[in-house]
Amino acid sequence: MVALELEGLTKEWPAMKIRVDLKVEAGSLMALAGPSGCGKSTVLRMIAGLCHPDSGLVRIGGNNVTALSPRDREVGMVFQDYALFPHLDVLSNVAYGLTIRGVPRKTREAQAIDILESVGMHSFSKRRPHELSGGERQRVALARTIATRPRVVLFDEPLSSLDTVLRKHLRSEISTHQKRFGLTAIYVTHDLEEAMAMADNIAVMDGGSILQCTTPIELWSKPASEAVARFLGNGPCLPILRFESSGKELVAITATGRFGFQAGIVRSWGQSIEHLMDIESSATTLSPNMANACIFFERTLARPVSYEEFIHLNLQCGYGLFSATCIRTDFAGDAIDCLMEAGQKNISLRLAPENAPAQGEHVHFIVKTEKIRIVPAD
């Protein structure tokens, strides 16, 4: 069941226009991810009623709440700076939403204590916010938000100011509590790892629009466009200059190599990109979308080879072959991240330490084209 729906929601300024359509299933966590300044937090504010859209609808539980005040929307929000009241103790902070709703004192305190116990903060109930660590304040902020039993919970980069170790611990806690309480949530972040770890679905946003919305696994393996692939940062996008037909093979030519696909459907997605090949006549029909496309593959799939193997495989179908020059290498634990120049375009590859090239070294690479995708170029 759809718990939250954004239909044609827009907000426009001279330098930017936001237009969003989105559906969030009940009890799921949707990550709204994208670079800073792409409009993520503005979308959250429009859902909460803190910013009025120029047009479009916000529906919660099937009801149009666009014209309702923030208080009447049954939406909870967890902010980056926690927004706790410094003059109130932890218990009073958590009970605040119940207080303004007129819940009797004994009832609201009992409910607040139950929530604090569930997030492991019951023993801190008499402390003030300044007596808590960043992680403890974040737990209290979450407890205060869910105490009123909101229909939708909005997280606006709540962990961005915390250190890496604590951030990983708390994202696990938030995910656990979200599932325990069956919360419908939107989680705004520019941290891709955070989104992948927590979300049931991820909506990638850039320039005020949602570029792709799908599961983390689907997003990682099948970015719908060059812009999405670039945000993921998990592989190179090489612009296709032209296609050539050779027997039972369709060859995509790039500035730095060739990628031979066996006859049939090119593995692709997005704007129905496909090619159809008549093997008998060697005739090739290309979708108009393929006139502006890129080769994409995950950065761990390319394998460096000798010049002799490179030449040998060049005659075989089902391989992509390209060359690149190493600009820089960065240690990444059990692998080496290599920034390579390939046909006047910088790409990132992740190689095993024993295969890492030296700076300035020119290297030949192969990748099986069954692992390659063709995506629309920007």
Image: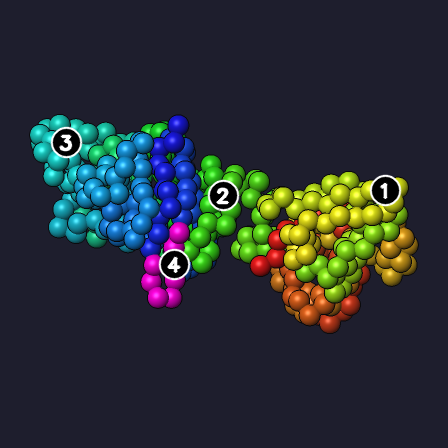
Distance CA(mark 2)–CA(mark 3) = 39 Å
* In the displayed structure image, the side of residue 208 where residue 288 appears, left or right: right
- Residue range highlighted in magenta: 12-19
Distance CA(mark 4)–CA(mark 2) = 19 Å
Residue 308, compared with residue 197, is above or below; it is: below
Q: Nearer the viewer, mark 3 or mark 4?
A: 4
State the residue position of label 2: 213
Q: Is residue 233 visible?
A: no
Distance CA(mark 3)–CA(mark 4) = 42 Å
State the residue position of label 3: 108
- Asked which quadrant contains residue 7, the reply is top left
Distance CA(mark 1)–CA(mark 4) = 47 Å
Classified by dominant secondary structure, the portion drawn in magenta counts as strand
Q: Nearer the viewer, mark 2 or mark 1?
A: 1
Distance CA(mark 2)–CA(mark 1) = 36 Å
Residue type highlighted by circle 4: Lys
Which percent across, then down, holds residue 264? 77, 40
- Residue at 31% in and 50% down: 55
Label 3 crowd bin: few (<14), some (14–19), many (20+), radius 10 Å: many
Which percent across, then down, holds residue 212? 51, 46
State the residue position of label 4: 17
